[in-house]
């Protein structure tokens, strides 16, 4: 009989040959998913339970075919949150947690702040803020119908208000123009390319790609943020790791912002631009 340790070794080697970036981790997570335990609680030297080998082989085959791990599990972790994800919605990435943490810190000292998450997708940023600042009034804007189904599921009972709309539409949320304390966005920003990891192409293209330079959506997001924010309100946006200078210039040239700064992810990459809504 195969032990769990043996099964994990074989699985990790198969995933490594398939080009999966984190073969040991993925093999362990899929095993713990099957036996309903924490990934550190797998009884490595015990014989696998009946039926484990067949079910595990099926999951490993899907991952070796480069189906995203989160699609196989039906969930993605984002800070303290477990979010439902699947085909049709962008899988939140760990680097975006840096923007989420910045957002929460930006609200210090404000009572019942109003927050807007543009291009919310799974609802990750909106829910992170709402979870750590339950007094905040959080609105999450999403355009795509398929993604919106996940937004609605994930935000159910959270107090986050979901808005079906285009984040770049000059009329979206116009009833609260000038009344928002914080706008955050993880919009489509990847330049069109056929050279990315296979998993990227399983995210909806609408949520990933933004023209040949990755900049086709960001100007409209900046315009919406400028309109919604009150004077002194904060704006934070994620961008491609090659476009920091362009995004900084765009936000400055918008004319509505001051204190334009770079925020780096945990690898030190310039991944976000932050700014403050200026007077007039």
Image (cartoon, rainbow, N blue to C red):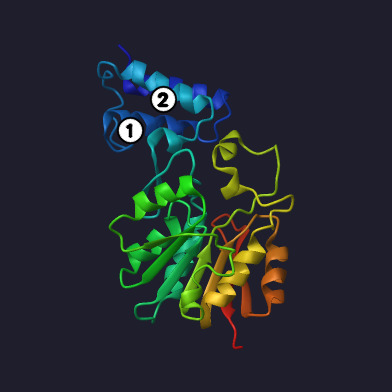
> Quick one: label 1, few (<14), some, or many (20+) residues within 10 Å?
some
Kind of element beneath mark 1: helix
Residue that carries the numbered disc 2 in the rendered image: 59
Residue 137 position, x and y percent, is: 36, 71
Q: Is 22 displayed left or right of 8 in the figure?
A: right
Q: How many discs appear?
A: 2
Residue under the point 36% across and 23% down:
5
The relative height of residue 36 versus residue 125 in the rendered view (above or below) is above
Residue that carries the numbered disc 1 in the rendered image: 33
- Residue 35: image quadrant is top left
Residue 198 position, x and y percent, is: 60, 34
Question: Which one is nearer the viewer's eye here, 54 or 17?
Answer: 54
Question: Which one is nearer the viewer's eye here, 250 or 54?
Answer: 250
Tell me whether the residue at label 2 lies in contact with that at label 1, contact meaning CB atoms closer than 8 angstroms.
yes
Residue 202 position, x and y percent, is: 55, 37
Q: Is residue 25 visible?
A: no
Lower position in the chain sequence, tag 2 or tag 1: 1
Quadrant, the N terminus: top left
Q: Which residue lies most toward the top here?
A: 1
Q: Can residue 50 be seen in this view?
A: yes
Residue 23 position, x and y percent, is: 49, 31
Residue under the point 60% across and 65% down:
221
Q: Is 38 displayed left or right of 169 in the figure?
A: left
Q: Is 30 displayed left or right of 238 in the figure?
A: left
Quadrant, the C terminus: bottom right
């Amino acid at each position: 009989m195969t032990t769990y340790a043996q099964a994990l070794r074989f699985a990790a080697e198969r995933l490594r040959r398939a080009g999966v970036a984190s073969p040991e981790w993925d093999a362990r997570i899929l095993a713990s998913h099957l036996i309903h335990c924490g990934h550190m609680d797998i009884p490595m030297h015990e014989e696998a339970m009946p039926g484990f080998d067949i079910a595990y082989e099926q999951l490993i085959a899907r991952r070796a075919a480069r189906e995203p791990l989160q699609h196989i599990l039906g969930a993605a972790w984002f800070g303290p949150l477990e979010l439902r994800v699947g085909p049709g919605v962008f899988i939140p990435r760990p680097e975006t947690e840096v923007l989420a943490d910045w957002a929460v810190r930006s609200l210090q000292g404000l009572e019942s702040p109003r927050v807007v998450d543009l291009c919310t997708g799974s609802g990750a940023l909106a829910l992170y803020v709402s979870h750590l600042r339950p007094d905040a009034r959080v609105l999450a804007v999403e355009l795509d119908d398929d993604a919106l189904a996940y937004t609605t599921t994930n935000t159910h009972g959270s107090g986050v208000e979901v808005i079906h709309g285009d984040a770049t539409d000059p009329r979206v949320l116009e009833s609260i123009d000038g009344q928002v304390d914080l706008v955050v966005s993880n919009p489509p920003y990847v330049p069109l390319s056929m050279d990315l990891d296979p998993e990227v192409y399983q995210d909806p293209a609408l949520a990933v790609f933004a023209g040949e330079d990755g900049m086709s959506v960001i100007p409209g997001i900046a315009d919406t943020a400028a309109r919604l924010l009150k004077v002194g309100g904060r704006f934070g946006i994620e961008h491609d790791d090659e476009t920091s200078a362009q995004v900084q210039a765009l936000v400055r040239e918008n004319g509505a912002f001051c204190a334009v700064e770079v925020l780096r992810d945990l690898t030190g990459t310039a991944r976000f631009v932050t700014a403050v809504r200026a007077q007039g």
